[in-house]
Each structure stands twice: as C-alpha cells, then as structure tokens.
Image: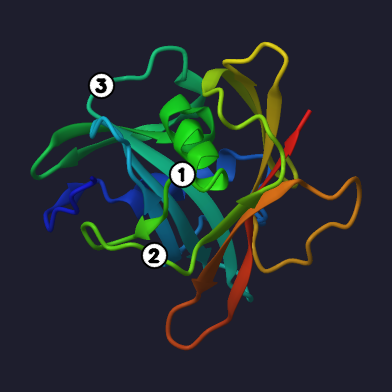
Amino acid sequence: MAVIHRTTVKPTKLELLTNWLPTRAWYAGTGTAPALGKAGGFRLDDPAGEVGIEFMVVADTSGGTPVPYHVPLTYRGAPLDGAEDGLVGTLEHGVLGKRWVYDAAHDPVAVEELLQLLAGRTGAQAQSETDVPDPSVVARFEGAALGAGVGSLSAMDDAEGTRVVVETGDPAARVQLRIRRVLGRPESAEGEAPQGHVTADWKLLEGGASGRERFVEASEI
C-alpha cells in the first residue's frame, strides 16, 4: 500500500515536468515554457511497496487554451537499470530522501500493475489519499495475455502518445499499450478497436474544462 506523505518535495513534480514536457514528441506547445497545474489522476500500488506509481494529469495554461496532459510517473529510491531514456529527473523528498522519477511507460513495475488493473486483479487508488480506492477509474480487457507478467518492454513516443510493447512471460503472448498523452481531443477512430482500456476523469482548476476519457488502450499483438 502506498503511503501519501504530507511533506516537502524539491524540486516539485510540476517543476520537473516543466522542463521535461517540451522534450516529448507529443508535446503540443508552441515554444513557450509550460505553465503547469494539477488536473487529476490516480495511483496504483506496487505490492512490494518499493515503487510509487502515479497517473497524473497536468494542465498547461501557457497558451490561449489550457492543454491537459496525461503523465504517468514512477518514483524510485534508486536508479532503474536500462531506463535512462525514461528518466524525468530527481527530487528530494522530505521523508523518503532522494527519488528518481521516471516516465512510467519505461518502468516494468508500473506496466505490470497497469496490466493487473486491466485484468481486474487490482484497483485504482485515490491520487492524494492513503488506502482510499478510486472507483471512478474503470478498466476492462477482453484478451487473454495479461496473466503472464512482464518479461520485457519497449516504449516509443510519437505525435499521438506513447506506444508500449510488452513481451509477457509467455513467449507467444505480447500486449500493446497505447498511452494517450494529450487529453481533451477527439479520440482517433483509425485502426482496429482496442481489446481493453482504462478510463478516468480529469478536470481543470477554477471551474475549467473537464472530461472522462481513455487514458490507456490495450490489445494483444
């Protein structure tokens, strides 16, 4: 169970993301530094209690119209071998000390728990409360490949989001996860319908726009 500490974090998550977001292929900004605020999200628990897993939504208000981004992150007490491309940065946590922050698409613990969520074997947790389920997060999957665990994974960004190919423990079974990054846009109708998805809410601050959308889509490949 993840414990939410009320403490200081330096730099803040939003400060880390201000520098990282413009380096992404799916970033929709126009050259101005992002001005970020929180706009929702949820957490998943690492059964081993070692890795923090947060599916965060942040809103960039630097342009004329706020743009909400879906940014899943993991928090670790040591560097993750082989995940240098997924490192967002480091921060100093007032209770836990130095934490390495990763794009969760590159973290096998986060991907494993996302598969467990899709398979209905775990549930989402509230973003800012300890041991409080978030029933508004709905996950479903109609395939059969989610019981084999994560053998390896590869993640690639493009203009639409992040594609994660998961080699499961079964050599004959692979899963593709499509992480939607820019929310508030019409969902693409191209290609085959996914076999599963995770749906959640986001809401801009001060009475702004809100939505309920697919954060993640999943299919066997």
Would residue 202 be found to the left or right of residue 52 on screen? right
Q: Residue at x 58, y 81 (%)?
A: 209
Residue position for label 3 = 78
Q: Name the foreground residue: 1 vs 81.
A: 1
* Secondary structure type for disc 3: loop
Q: Amino acid at mark 3?
A: Ala
Spatial separation of the CA atoms under disc 2 and disc 1: 15 Å
Viewer-nearest of labels 1 and 3?
A: 1
* Res 100 → quadrant: top left
Q: Amino acid at mark 1?
A: Arg
- Does the residue at mark 1 contact the one at mark 3 (Cβ under 8 Å)? no
Q: Residue at x 62, y 53 (%)?
A: 140
> Farthest residue in the bottom direction?
207
Q: Amino acid at mark 2?
A: Asp
* Tally of numbered discs: 3
Q: Residue at x 9, y 45 (%)?
A: 94
Query: Mark on residue 134?
Result: 2
Spatial separation of the CA atoms under disc 3 and disc 2: 28 Å
